[in-house]
Amino acid sequence: MANATKTHDNREVKEYLSPPSLLWEAFEDHPWLDDVLTGAVWLKSPGDTSTRPLRKALVYQVLSLCDDITTAAVQDITGGLHSQQHAALYAAAGRVASRAIAARIQGLNGQAPSPPISISNLYKGDLK
């Protein structure tokens, strides 16, 4: 039995980050974004023995260009340059970062994050 396609609605974050800019410009506009992306690129799934993080710039591209974050969407924006397995890692990092940014947006708007934000809630199910 095949796994269900993991997807995440990223429209709120995409709108917040629009228009898409260079990564260093995004860091100037949103200094906290570097911390979010750093955390997302270093997350590891069980059994992942890689010692290198994913690229922040590509995770930022996923966040600023994808309405829905899926493995197929990552492959689309990269022109198919990444294998499905590698694109799935970027999609997982994008979903984690998107949830963290959405919680930040809600906080900036004076709303409590819903559901309560925690590290375990951010990547629950994404890194299996």
Image (cartoon, helix red, strand yellow):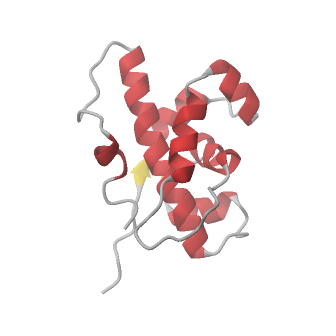
Query: Residue visible at 25% across and 32% down?
Result: 114
Tell whether 64 sits left or right of 107.
right
Tell whether 50 sits left or right of 109.
right
Vertical arrangement, residue 102 with respect to residue 44, above or below: above
Query: Residue visible at 61% across and 63% down?
Result: 51
Image quadrant where residue 99 sits:
top left
Residue nearest the observer in this picture, 23 or 74: 23
Vertical arrangement, residue 34 with respect to residue 82, above or below: above
Farthest residue to the top: give it.
110
Placement of the C terminus among the 4 image quadrants: bottom left
Vertical arrangement, residue 1 with respect to residue 22, above or below: below
Placement of the N terminus among the 4 image quadrants: bottom left
Vertical arrangement, residue 73 with respect to residue 31, above or below: below
Query: Residue visible at 57% across and 30% down?
Result: 33
Q: Can residue 68 be seen in this view?
A: no
Farthest residue to the bottom: give it.
1
Query: Residue visible at 65% across and 62% down?
Result: 76
